[in-house]
Each structure stands twice: as structure tokens, then as C-alpha cells.
Image (spheres, grey):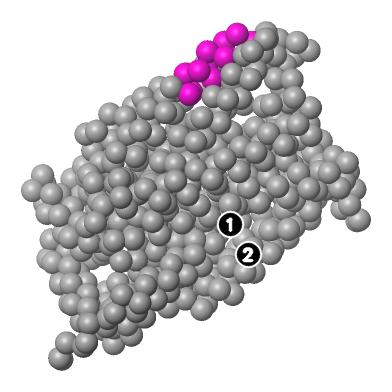
Amino acid sequence: MSEATKSTPAEVKKLDRRVTALAVVAAIGGFLFGFDSSVINGAVDSIGKEFHIPDAASGIVVASALIGCAVGAYLGGRFADRWGRIRVMFIAAILFFASSILAGLAFATWDFIIWRLVGGLGIGIASVIAPAYISEVAPKGIRGRLGSFQQLAITLGIFAALGSDQLFQIIGGSASGMIGPFPAWRWMFLVGVIPSVVYGILALRLPESPRYLAGEGRRDEARDVLKQIVPTETVETNLHDIEDAIKKEEELTKKSSIRGNRFGLKPIVWVGIILAVLQQFVGINVIFYYSTTLWQAVGFKESQSFLISTITSVVNVAVTFVAIALVDKVGRRPMLLWGSVGMTVSLAFMAISFSQSHIVGGNPQLPGAWGPIALVAANIFVISFGATWGPLMWVLLGEMFPSNIRAAALGIGSSANWIANFVVTVAFPALAAVSLALSYGIFAFFALISIFFVLFKIKETKGRSLEEMGSEALEGATATA
């Protein structure tokens, strides 16, 4: 086939805009992720009162969706390899739609937990598909930026959840106050039908991943998709590179096999798992799941606590734009290192602040300047996380694995992330009851570990093709077998 005329800069920009639009739609799954994980924040106290849930069991209620998320993430990669990325996105939207309605209408604790688990399945699936799809359609020069859309969408979902929680709390007078036929906390869940419908409709308009199509032998369809996202003169070259990489990977390992000689998995899969676990073990979701309750405990009123939580979520959104702007210029590794240092220092200050607390009426109170210091440190922590580890973990998980195991390995990594999220969410109330200083001290310890993990285990992926990195990862695994 003869080479086509080289695309003009204007045509290349048009293609980049098209790919950006595809990434935005795929990242709506991240919005559902953030919304679902934080909507419980403003409702947890009222749910406890409604269903007479003991304080000791509140962690299970908050974290119930995370079990579904872990299972959904694990299965999502396998479903995506079997049915394609787009069909699985639609399945995730349906599950979240059902959960939003039925959790909002729950009549008992067990009923609520079941529908939160169903929603978790959808969110877990979406958390795998979005980064996999984005990495597979994005050109390498802007892949980091587009991959960061996943975390931006998560932060926007968190903001939307906390903002809508606050709005319903204001309208109802409290989270338990009535708005029409339902208390405000039920509306906090019911409103989730809106993003789920948007996600489902838009997902059906996306083209399938060309790498998935090529892996299934659907060469003409893969070529048609590539024509929509890369310059005309590079379509055949891109298709050839994808097919060559798939053949090479199949020679080195069984198709779609993540198994290896390191405790049953390939070394690269373990790197992804540890990266995903450390992202949660620094305790970021404690800020978003328990912040309203936490700030009330240290002296702020309910309305002030909602406002602080919302402001924190705005900060989280804003700093994600920093990551989007820098990731393809600075690189993944330097940003992760600076983020780890910032998280270690800010968490240490939070631990010190809460070590100064004393108990008043059963709740910790921070004397003098220690309350504002803890608040500032919490927001510095969010900034350090949101500009680095938040988005870059998803970027790396989307690009570090070979194409023939990408969805499956991403599913394992994402599942590990959700399990770690569950552990932290369930453990925090018990740890906090013992000592908030101990809780934040533990998070600071894991932030410190993350510095050394990045130094010794994370390779830079900036400006490299997925095919190049995938072959290198498999060759490294073979060499160490």
C-alpha cells in the first residue's frame, strides 16, 4: 500500500482533539468511581441512625461497596479481553444505575449493603476499563496527559458527591431531614442515576480499542479505528507495530497469561500490585470517606465540616490539572518521588497534631493552633497526592503491561487497589478509636516506603510506545525466570 500524503499540523491537532474526546468519555467511568466512593461521606451518620447500626460496624457499611469494587476490577479485565472494552463499559453503567436507585431506596442494613456491592461491581469494572482503553487509543506523546483524565474524573466525581451531599443537607436541614417523600441521605444516592445514564449512552458511541481488535484478528476493524485516531500515513505502521508486538508477546508467554515465577505472577504484575496498594495505604480515602465526621470530632460544626470536605475536594480537582500539565514533560518517576516526599511530611505533621489532642465529651479536641495545623497538613497531603500518586498510578497501570495481558494485569492491580482501600476504610475507625496520631503515623510510614519503591522499582515510561514497553517487560520477566 502506498504511503498517503503526510498529515498537516492542523489535521494532527484535529486527531488529537478526537482522541481527547474519546478519553474524556472513557474517563466518565472514573467519575462514577469517585462519586460512588465519596457519596457515603455525607450519609453515613444518618444511615447508622436509620438502620440502628452500631458505631463498630460503620466501617463495614462504608466499605461494603469496596468489596464489590475489588471483585469487579478482578473480573473486569477478563471480561474486557473476552467481550471488548466498550461492552464492558456499558455493563458497568447498568450496574451503577441499579445500585443508585436501590441503595437509595434500601429498607434495611443488609439490603443497603447488597446494592452497594452491586454498585461496587460496576465501579470496579469501570476502574479497569477506563485506563486500559485510554492508553490503547492515545498517542505516546500525550498518553500521560490523557491517562491522567481517569484521576481527574475521579476527583470531579468526589467533588460532585460531596457537593451534592452538602446541597441535599442544606435543603433538608440535615442529612436526615425530609426532601419530598425521602430523607436527604436517600437523595444523595438516587442522584447517581444521572452520571450512570450519561456514561452508558456515551460509551456505546465509542470505537473499540484497536489493540483489542487486532488481538482478536479483526484487522480491518482495527485499521478503521486507527484511521480515526492517528495520521493517515502512520495507520499501517501503527497496525503493523501492534500486530508485531502481539506476535512477539505470544512467543514469550501464553496468551493473556499473567502467571509467572514470582509467587505465581510475573514480576511486572507484582510491581503494579504494590504500586496500587501503596496508593491506598497512605490513607487518602480516609480524608474523603470520613472527613465530615473527622472534622466534627475535632470541633467543627456539621455545616462547617461539609464545607471543609467540599473545599478539600476542590483542591483535589485543581491539583490534578497540575499532573495533566506536567506528566508528559517532567515524567512519571520524578513526580511520584516528589509526591511521596510531600505525603510523608504532611502526614507526619497530622500525626504530631493529633498526638496533642485531648478527649472532651468522648471526642478528640485539638488545642490552640493544632486544629488549623492539622487542617493545613491534610490539604497539603491532598495536594501532594492529587498532583502525583492519584493520577500517575492509573497512568502507569494503563501503560506498563504488555498488550496481551494488559486488561487482566490491570484488573489485578485495580483489584489490589480496591482491597487496600477496603482494609484502610474498615481499619480506620478502630485505629482512630485507639489513636488518631497512630493512624496518621502508619500512613506516614507507608508514604515513606513509597519513596524507596519508586526509586528502585518504577521505570520511566514517558514518550515510549506501549509495544516497546510491553516487549521489554516480557523479555525482563523471561530473563529472570
Q: Can you name the residue that lies furthest to the left here? A: 479
Q: In the rendered view, tell whether residue 270 sits above or below residue 401.
A: above
Indicate which disc residue 462 carries. none
Q: In the rendered view, tell whether residue 404 sits above or below residue 214.
A: above
Q: Position of residue 182 (x, y in %)?
A: 87, 53
For numbered disc 2, what is the local secondary structure? helix
Residue 353 within the magenta-colored segment of the rendering? yes
Residue 93 within the magenta-colored segment of the rendering? no
The residue at 48%/24% (across/down) is: 346
Q: Position of residue 306 (x, y in %)?
A: 73, 36
Foreground residue among 201 and 4: 4
For label 2, the residue is 196
The residue at 76%/44% (across/down) is: 166
The residue at 67%/54% (across/down) is: 115
* Label 1 crowd (10 A; few <14 / some 14-19 / many >=20): many
Q: Position of residue 108 (x, y in %)?
A: 78, 47
As measured in the structure, the alpha-carbon distance from the residue carrying label 2 to the one carrying label 1 is 7 Å
Q: Position of residue 443 (x, y in %)?
A: 46, 25
Q: In the rendered view, tell whether residue 358 sits above or below residue 439.
A: above
User: Chief secondary structure of the magenta span?
Assistant: helix
Q: In the rendered view, tell whether residue 251 sits above or below residue 277.
A: below
What amino acid is labelled 1 in the image?
Leu
The residue at 50%/43% (across/down) is: 319
- The answer to whether the residue labelled 2 contacts the one labelled 1, judged by CB atoms less than 8 Å apart, is yes
Q: Is residue 171 left or right of residue 162?
A: right
What amino acid is labelled 2 in the image?
Ser
For label 1, the residue is 32
Q: Is residue 327 left or right of residue 23?
A: left
Magenta segment: 346-357
